[in-house]
Image (cartoon, helix red, strand yellow):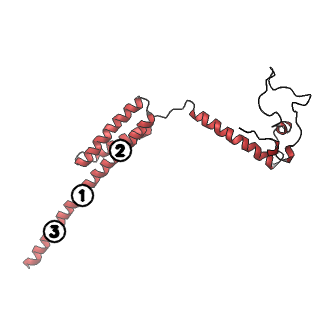
């Protein structure tokens, strides 16, 4: 990676700093090893004790710090963090299953099938959580919730169709009784 030089820092940063040619220069390490970094690169920042003297110097400092901070953030998020247990998904799936059972989803063959699938997927999700496959368990539990919601919707639709059919029959009976009265007069 190419390190920024003084030319990137602007005119105010072009003050001479200690270099290897100077008499007062000492290596950064006690054993005399060189760090491999251009020692003059941050000379103006050291002399200025962290004070930025121009907008270009501030830009140069921010250009160097952004990639570093992104690297630190990525490294810290990757270290030791596993996928969390999908407890919310598990409880949501179980709640949706109970709601579908209460609504009578077992009565319709189509909704009963989706109810059965939801039960199986919840059990599969619990097993995956025990195996430590939390991400996969989350997706299985999402699918279980979707199946339970579908079973509930199908059961509700079936109940509404039955009510509509009963209302239609009652309406037909009323219409027939009105016709009979009109024909008897």
Estimate the spatial distance between the alpha carbons at disc 3 and disc 1, rounded to whole Å.
Answer: 20 Å
Estimate the spatial distance between the alpha carbons at disc 1 and disc 2, rounded to whole Å.
Answer: 22 Å
Assign a secondary structure to mark 3. helix
Assign a secondary structure to mark 2. helix
Q: Which residue is mark 3?
A: 174
**Residue 48 position in % (x across, y down):** 85, 39
Where 139 sits versus 179, above or below? above
Task: Please give the name of the residue rendered at 31% of the width and 51% of the height, measured from the top-left corner.
Answer: 153
Estimate the spatial distance between the alpha carbons at disc 3 and disc 2, rounded to whole Å.
Answer: 40 Å
Residue at the bottom extreme of this rendering: 185
Task: Please give the name of the residue rendered at 64% of the width and 35% of the height, measured from the top-left corner.
Answer: 72
Assign a secondary structure to mark 1. helix
Residues marked 1 and 2 touching at CB (< 8 Å): no
Q: Nearer the viewer, mark 3 or mark 2?
A: 2
Mark found first going from the N terminus, 3 or 2: 2
Task: Please give the name of the residue rendered at 38% of the width and 35% of the height, measured from the top-left corner.
Answer: 125
Task: Please give the name of the residue rendered at 17% of the width and 63% of the height, measured from the top-left corner.
Answer: 169
Q: Residues within 10 Å of mark 2 (few under 14, many from 20)?
A: many
Residue at the top extreme of this rendering: 31
Q: Residues within 10 Å of mark 1 (few under 14, many from 20)?
A: few
Residue 161's disc is 1
Residue 35 horizontal side relative to residue 86, left or right = right
Q: Which residue is mark 2?
A: 96
**Residue 54 position in % (x across, y down):** 82, 48
Residue at the right extreme of this rendering: 23
Where 58 sits versus 72, above or below? below
């Amino acid at each position: 990676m190419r390190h920024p030089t003084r030319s990137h820092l602007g005119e105010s940063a072009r003050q001479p700093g200690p270099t290897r040619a100077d008499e007062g220069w000492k290596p950064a390490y006690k054993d005399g090893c060189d760090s491999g970094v251009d020692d003059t690169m941050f000379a103006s920042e050291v002399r200025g004790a962290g004070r930025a003297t121009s907008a270009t110097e501030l830009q140069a400092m921010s250009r160097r710090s952004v990639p570093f901070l992104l690297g630190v953030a990525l490294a810290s998020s990757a270290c030791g963090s596993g996928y969390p247990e999908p407890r919310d998904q598990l409880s949501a799936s179980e709640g949706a299953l109970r709601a579908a059972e209460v609504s009578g989803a077992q009565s319709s063959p189509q909704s009963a099938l989706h109810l059965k699938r939801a039960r199986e997927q919840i059990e599969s999700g619990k097993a995956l959580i025990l195996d430590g496959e939390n991400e996969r368990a989350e997706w299985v539990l999402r699918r279980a919730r979707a199946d339970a919601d579908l079973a509930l919707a199908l059961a509700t639709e079936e109940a509404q169709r039955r009510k509509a059919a009963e209302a239609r029959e009652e309406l037909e009976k009323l219409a027939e009784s009105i016709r009979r009265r009109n024909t008897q007069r």
